[in-house]
Amino acid sequence: MSAVRYVSTRGRAPELGFTDVLLAGLATDGGLYVPEHWPTLPAHRPGSTYAQRAAQIVQLFVGDDLAPATVQRLCDEAYATFTHPAVVPLVQIDTENFVQELFHGPTLAFKDLALQLVGRMFDEVLRARGQRVTIVGATSGDTGSAAIDAVKHCANVDIVILYPHGRTSDVQRRQMTTVSSPNVRVAAVEGTFDDCQDLVKAMFNDAPFRERMQLSAANSINWARVMAQVVYYVVATDLLAAPVNVCVPSGNFGNVFSGWIARRMGASIDQLVVASNANDILERFINHDDMSTAPVVPSLSPSMDIQVSSNFERLLFEMNGRDGVQTAEQLQRLRAAGHLRVDAHQRAVHIDGRFQAARLDDTETLAVIDGTHRATGMLLDPHSAVGVGAVEKLRAAGRLAGTTVTLATAHPAKFPDAVERATGVRPALPAHLADLFDLPEHFTVLANDLSAVQQFVATTFA
Ligand SMILES: *Cc1c(COP(=O)(O)O)cnc(C)c1O
């Protein structure tokens, strides 16, 4: 093992090693970190556990910043919090369609797969360095609870989570607001998820504040999360006859970019399918070469109610031949003019025939939940249903063929109202969350205003 170096997608931040990237989150030039080189996937050792496969892959990105025995221990601990022995079971729903259930972690969404590991990595690294950080994060619902659960016992981490007031499900909100740990604070911002995300980015771009508070990120701009998500794509291709398409209910583009990395490393993935709800900027980009921002529309799949997909920047950097200056200019134009154009050559090489996309509105989503339940007995949450429905649409249009794995990104009990509306069946919370509606809630409502939010962060743990 040797050191692994990371570069910023905007080309003007210092190169860093893994542990510095872990703690930094965003690069100082506003860009996102990616490894200098993409490693090659090591062969699958038959019979290895999820945690063993994870440690093998994660080590390639950690290099000698953490010893192999440490990486294996952290993976073992992280994935022992999952209630299914396979961690991410593959369920076949018909001849060519599989669902990979990513929701058996403590907070019932796929975010646990990355954050249970990343929280433990934070604590390990901070303890060794004798440091403390404050994680600030924006959540459309699921990141917040997953991040809180991952760090609530960490001695060296404080966490502040911002969520859009009134735009998460009751279960999502309560999973955040009912945690009473001295290092956890939750704020409801009067705005959308994109507003929350902009506030977090603005706090990071305020260098003195960032330094004073020792800010760190837990949302999907953090490289370590994207890294940890690569594992379940690899595990799916380990198990199924190659090659497979993977359909990803998408919002911030973090999950599907992990699939892109898995394919780049050599996992036998054919198409990556981006499934969108009514907030369809990614679908419009892939199908119609139209990346233009539009107002966020609330939907039944709130964790995908996003118009500016921050992790798309990592793909854009690759599309630009890793030219950070050009990437920064394009993003600047997207911000200023509200739309982004990529040239025909870039599309031909990186998008066409590599990515597929489809969108479902809420009515279609409910119909998929109902139809899947009737056909298979399986209850899909609305996010996962957008994925299953996207595959149905693309197959019907002749645009997708062969074995396809749809990622089930949340447990149905996280969105019980939508599931009940579609099927008449109200999914029950798993036993470890059965008292969720009996616990008191703790949160602060804040205006969509940077100085108000900075004040909240600065005074909370003082
Ligand atoms: C976060 C989330 C998504 C979107 O994932 P991205 O990485 O932001 O694309 C989809 N479904 C659920 C349930 C989520 O929590």
Image: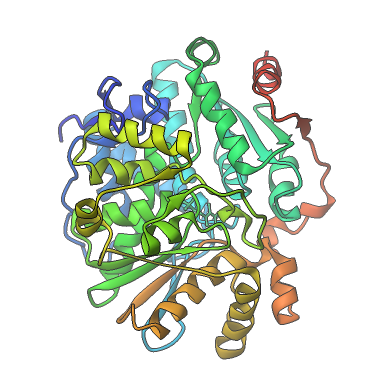
Determine the residue located farthest toward the front in the rendered image.
Answer: 337
Residue 69 appears in the rendering = yes
* Side of 462 relative to 392 (left or right): right
Q: Is residue 157 above or below residue 334?
A: above
Q: Is residue 269 above or below residue 457?
A: below
Q: Quadrant of the N terminus?
A: top left
Q: Quadrant of the C terminus?
A: top right
* Front-most of residues 28 and 130: 28
* Front-most of residues 343 and 438: 343
In percent of width and height, residue 250 lies at 48, 57
Residue 156 appears in the rendering = no
In percent of width and height, residue 164 lies at 69, 42
* Side of 33 relative to 440 (left or right): left
Q: Residue at x 69, y 62 (%)?
A: 431
* Side of 17 relative to 289 (left or right): left
Where residue 402 sits, quadrant-wise, is bottom left
Total numbered badges shown on the rendered structure: 0
In percent of width and height, residue 348 lies at 21, 59
In percent of width and height, residue 92 lies at 43, 81
* Front-most of residues 120 and 232: 232
* Front-most of residues 127 and 231: 231
Q: Residue at x 72, y 67 (%)?
A: 416
Q: Is residue 452 above or below residue 427?
A: above
